[in-house]
Image (cartoon, rainbow, N blue to C red):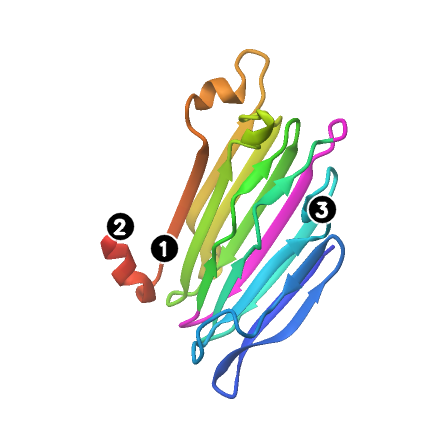
Amino acid sequence: MVTGKVVVEKVGGRSTATSCFSKYPLKFLLPSKAAPAGTDVVWIYSITYGGGIVSGDSISCEFTVGDGCTAVITTQSSTKVYKAIGSECSEQIVEARIGSESLLVVIPDPVTCFSTARYYQKQIFRLVSDSNLVLVDWITSGRHANGEKWDFEFYKSINNVYLEDDYPLFLDTVLLEKRSIQSIAERMQDYHAIAMVILFGSKLKEIQKQT
């Protein structure tokens, strides 16, 4: 069942959120003054009640960015995944459709899993040939102030990008799982974060040249 949905379309020549729906445990904020004056973009802040994802939570979001529109999806702080109750796994599913000559920028704060947390997320992006996408997906090692380092039990993040007719353009999965032989912390050694960045589309050529 969908817990959140946003549609962005051109209205009067400007990118406009024509539909916005969310229900517990998800909430969307669409501030009108997040971008500099005159900038044609819709900012979407995705937040959860209680400041994080509770064990067993299931969140499903759909975003549609119409032709010629620009939208940014972000968060107000790190996505906290709280301790798991038993074997319960929290999950978040995101599906986005990006129209012709449109740009979607997904730049959330990192996921931070608490000790014993179990978290699964899947993000699917459907593009046409002249769509544009910026995607950042990242996770930290945990709550350092509490002495936690890669102390969660399960983390799986799937990012799939498709062109028309479901042609796979990019398929990626990150899996971190506690095992009896070797812990996640032992496998990650001194690293404290994992990040992935996708830049796709002609509008991002100048940025791509700098990477």
Q: CA distance from mark 3 to mark 2?
A: 35 Å
- The single residue placed furthest to the front in the displayed view is 145
The tag earlier along the polypeptide, 3 or 1, is: 3
Residue 18 location, quadrant: bottom right
- The single residue placed furthest to the top in the displayed view is 181
Considering only vertical position in the picture, is 179 above or below 143? above
Which secondary structure lies at badge 1? strand
Quickly name the residue at label 2.
211
Mark 1 and 2 residues: CB-CB less than 8 Å, in contact?
yes
Quickly name the residue at label 3.
58
Q: For the residue carrying disc 3, how many other residues have a C-alpha within 10 Å: few (<14), some (14-19), or many (20+)?
A: many
Q: In the rendered structure, does residue 92 fall within the stretch colored magenta?
A: yes
**Position of residue 115 measured from the top left corner of the image (x, y, whole percent):** 64, 27
x 59%, y 45%: residue: 79
Quickly name the residue at label 1.
199
x 29%, y 58%: residue: 207
Task: Please name which of the two marks, 3 or 2, marks the residue nearer to the observer.
Answer: 2
Q: Which mark is residue 168?
A: none
Considering only vertical position in the picture, is 103 above or below 92? below
Residue 144 location, quadrant: top right
